[in-house]
Image (cartoon, helix red, strand yellow):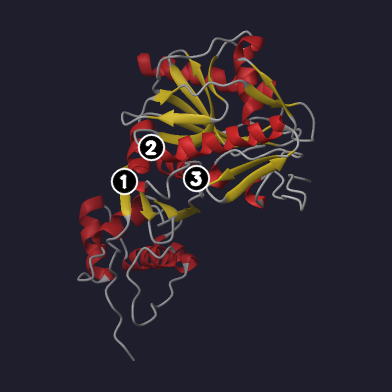
Amino acid sequence: MKEQQNPKARVDCLSREFGDETLVYDKQRNVGHCLNSTAAAAWKLCDGNRSTSEVAGILTQQLSAPVDESLVRLAVEELAKARLLVEPEAPRRRTSRRDVIRTLGIAGAIALPLVTSLVAPTPARAASCLKNGQPCGSNAQCCSGKCGTGGHCGA
Amino acid sequence: MNILYEDNVRIARDTDLDQVLAALETDLHRYTAEAAPSMTFLHAGVVGWQGRAILIPGRSLSGKTTLVREMLRLGATFYSDEFAVVDDFGMVHPFSRPLGIREDSTFAQTKYSAETFGAASGEKPLPLGTVVLCKYKAGARWNPASLSPGLGALELMGNSIAVRTEPQHTLRRIQELVKGVVFLKGARGEACESAASILNIATTDIGRETE
């Protein structure tokens, strides 16, 4: 069985900070992700050289609060699910959110890592649509989502 | 028969020229929003209120025009019912055209000028004050929750026209745009009630900032 690899953040994504959160844009998949403070801090430390326990140690210093390794493992899992890490050769061990809460207690000093994702719209989807009865060329143009065979948007 | 093509793709075909011209207008707006190099276009309604912009992001049929109309009736300045146009400094520019109000459930729109509702149209760019993320729900009471800047920025990204082609510029401008901004999210009932509440909240926030 292959040895568990250290987590490595993808470097081909764009990122911007908003307070203690980080917005990451995946250009390959056209998906935006909002990383909360814990997920963002972990993501920045995942360089492929540090183990999850080493990341936990650095976070403990950075945040001036004890950070359990299970919290970092959970962050890595969230980041991997969002495809923000370089894919490992061997599957990662799953960490249960419930187990982490049990380990840390409900009122942990550090927020649980959270990644919220949103698919970026195509220009046609983001822009206004055509009303019923208006001439159309494709379903995407119509508010109703239906461009009829006669070339008009319909219900 | 009137036929509209974009290169070799047929956009519209109709015996009624006005219908085809309406399709041309929609397509030109989309093209402008997508191709403008120095601005980021977000699909949103915008009004000016006490020197700041209030943004209501949302796709078609999300009720943003109705909310904009009610805010105009309450004294806000009209900026757009279609796009928030954001520059490199995070300032919001007007994109005024007549408001397209849907009078019934058939999607048919009637165009009204801002003056119809007793409002002026904004001419100068404004800094952003409040972002309102809401959906109409019959009978709902407007009781919004605040949203963190990161999640709010993600929502704005989801309403950006050119994020796929210009992600770097889009994120940078959104970052500038949302500095010190209040994000409100929730279901709203009738527009007249929520519009008054939004303007009240915006007033309070501006007051707090200037103290």
- Residue lying furthest front: B1
Mark 2 — residue? B174
Amino acid of disc 1: Arg
Farthest residue, direction bottom: A1
Mark 2–mark 3 distance (CA, rounded to whole Å)? 11 Å
Give the mark nearest the N terminus, 2 or 3: 3
Q: Which quarter of the image is occupied by the C terminus of chain B? A: top left
What residue do we see at 35% from left, 50% from top?
A37
Secondary structure under tag 2 reads helix
Q: Name the quadrant containing residue B128.
A: top left
Quarter of the N terminus of chain B within the rendering: top right
* Chain of the residue displaying label 2: B
Q: Residue at x 43, y 61 (%)?
A: A29
Q: Amino acid at mark 2?
A: Ile
Q: Is residue A22 visible?
A: no
Closer to us: B147 or B167? B167
Which residue is identified by label 1?
A16
Q: Chain of mark 1?
A: A
Q: Position of residue B196 (x, y in %)?
A: 62, 18
User: Helix, strand or loop at disc 1?
Assistant: strand
Which element carries disc 3, helix, strand or loop? loop
- Residue A155 position in % (x across, y down): 79, 46
Is residue B208 visible in the rendered image? The answer is yes
